[in-house]
Image (cartoon, rainbow, N blue to C red):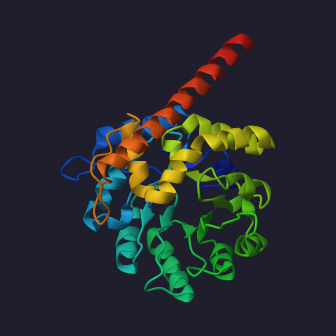
Amino acid sequence: MDIQPVSPERLAASVIAVPPLCRDQGLALDPAENRLLIRHLEQGGVRTLLYGGNANLYNMAPSEYPALLDLLEAEAGPDTLVIPSAGPFFGSMMDQAAILRDRSFPTAMILPTLFPATHSGVQEAVRLFVQRAGIPVVLYLKEERYLSPAAAAELFAEGLVSWIKYAVVREDPAQDDYLEELCDRVDPAYIVSGIGEQPAAVHTQQFHLVSFTSGCVCVAPGSSMDMLAALRNGDTPAAETIRTLFEELERLRNTHGPIPVLHHAVAEAGIAATGPILPLLDVLAQELVETIGPVARRLLQEESSRAAARAAGAAANG
């Protein structure tokens, strides 16, 4: 596992995968299946893994947290940055901070919640978490009401924030006064687009965000990494072509729930057995799973075709 402090260069080097957690039929963590998913991501070139909402850490027992950290430390490759999450509530957050203090993770994300919370209360929680954990945090801005740009910038200026995941959904991502103000107050080299491939081009090109997070990358990591490379190179047509590959699965996630759809997509594509979903969420109806499966498998097949084309091109040029 990569334990170096997170830099803008490190953020720019990889799509930030937000994977599900694989569990067995008794709801326990499944090391073997999580290993398969991690290897699939690493083989596609992904070198940053963020375990948060898609891993359903909101509903994880605090007593399971050390086992989760053990699993992530053991299974990640030496060049892979792994970021666990903590919270969302203050009590669990602080207990987890004490555990993280004795580990090697260079940062951790605080899961956001709107109730009961205030801007100044969230700021104080971040300060106390960093003091106890001894590491800076990832700020996850999912709702404008969670933290104002000024409040987020104040925490960043205090050296408490490693980077910011920006995930406020807009009908038109190009029209975003909140993000514009945030980028005026915090260097965009420390802000990551947090809503997958669909708004990534606007966020990286118009607002100059450094990279993007993705759940669908868990199915097609190489394709998502190709999109990031195209965006870095200013090749908008290539990035747009790749973006459309993820559109169908992302539409299902938006319609039926991003966490459960991704959970089933990884399993239906044959990448790893994700198992049952930890309550308070639940597995989806079988007829919906039968809709998700073909979409996930088509995306994985497209991933394989693109990988084969890259290999053929490299052989021809070699």
Q: Position of residue 41 (x, y in %)?
A: 49, 38
Residue under the image location 63 percent in, 71 percent down:
159
Which quadrant would residue 294 be assigned to in this image?
Answer: top left
Count of numbered badges drawn on the protein: 0
Q: Position of residue 182 (x, y in %)?
A: 72, 73
Left or right: residue 94 compared with residue 210? left
Q: Residue furthest front?
A: 287
Name the residue rendered at 61%, 55% in the picture: 6
66 or 22, nearer to the observer: 22
Estimate the x, y position of residue 274 in percent, counting from the top left: 33, 45
- Location of residue 178 with respect to 116 vertically, above or below: above
Say which residue appears at 53% left-offset and 79% top-offset: 127
* 91 horizontally vs 130: left or right: left
Which image quadrant is residue 101 in?
bottom left
Left-right relation of 1 to 195: left
Whether residue 139 is visible: yes
Residue 257 visible, this angle? no
Q: Is residue 98 above or below residue 115?
A: above
